[in-house]
Amino acid sequence: MRIAVLEDDRSQAFVLRKCLTTAGHNAINFERGTSLLEAMKDQKFDALLLDWNVPELSGVEVLSVVRNELGSNIPAVVVTARNAEEDIVHALRQGADDYICKPIRPRELIARLETVAKRDDEPANDDVMQFGRLRVDVAGRQVLLNNVPITLSLKDFDLAVYFMRNIGRVLSRRKIVEEVWGSNVDLTSRTLDTHVSRVRTKLWLTQDNHWHLGAVYGHGYRLERLN
């Protein structure tokens, strides 16, 4: 992938570039958000890696411009030393697909970047999705685990499909409800939690099976595949 990196600290930029190039990617570093935004007008990038605390425009402010003014859905991961809940939620609401807290762990960085980029490349309406022993037949509205059909309610099936189509992405509660139940439905948080719990249990989305379907406190949920 060709990845635009926003990082003004040259030592940190070197570390990020080394991580990315070692994994076979091409890293193009920018020290200022304005420079990155200017480059996006005539260059193609496959993903953005944005440090929050940079001069002029912060990484989150750059992301806001990318989403709201440039109208781009390019996969974007925010890197930050901030780990307070309100900061993470703010980054996600500005359009971040994921976030990584410093200090950087190279394998986690690559895994998260590749996950959000892969999701962007995958067709949104695959009729059949296969994940090891788990098979989701969207057209046939059937889930098979070890070739055994799993009984799901209509909305539990729709919820499972939505998670499977957004693996690795943090999904807000509001967005989940809108996509699965519709924008005019007033669904309580407790009701949503119950549906998620049923999907997790019936599809065995647990660490023992190399899955993690967990809550992102104060925001929503994320389904991840574990190595």
Image (cartoon, rainbow, N blue to C red):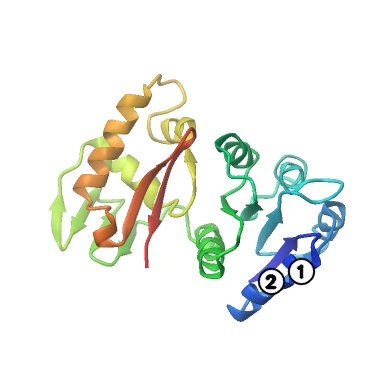
Q: In this rendering, would 224 be left or right of 120?
A: left
At which x and y percent is residue 181?
Answer: 38, 29
What's the residue type where badge 2 is placed?
Val
Q: Quadrant of the C terminus?
A: bottom left
The residue that appears at 58% across and 39% down in the rendered structure is: 84
Looking at the picture, does residue 112 appear above or below residue 56?
below
Identify the disc placed on residue 212: none
In the depicted view, which residue is nearer to us: 205 or 158?
A: 205
Residue 14 vs residue 176: left or right? right
Callout 2 secondary element = helix
Residue 106 shows up from this direction: yes
Helix, strand or loop at mark 1: helix
Question: Toward the viewer: 84 or 143?
Answer: 84
212 on left or right of 201: right
Residue 178 in percent (x, y) is at 45, 31
In the rendered view of the protein, which quadrant contains the N terminus?
A: bottom right
Asked if the residue under mark 2 is in contact with the one under mark 1, i.e. CB atoms within 8 Å, the reply is yes
Amino acid beneath label 1: Ser
Q: Residue furthest left?
A: 148
Q: Which mark is residue 15?
A: 2
Residue at 73%, 64% in the rendered image: 4
Name the residue beneath numbered marker 1.
Answer: 11
- Crowdedness of circle 1 by 10 Å Cα count: few (<14), some, many (20+)? few
Q: Residue at x 32, y 57 (%)?
A: 211
Task: Quadrant for residue 82, please give it.
Answer: top right
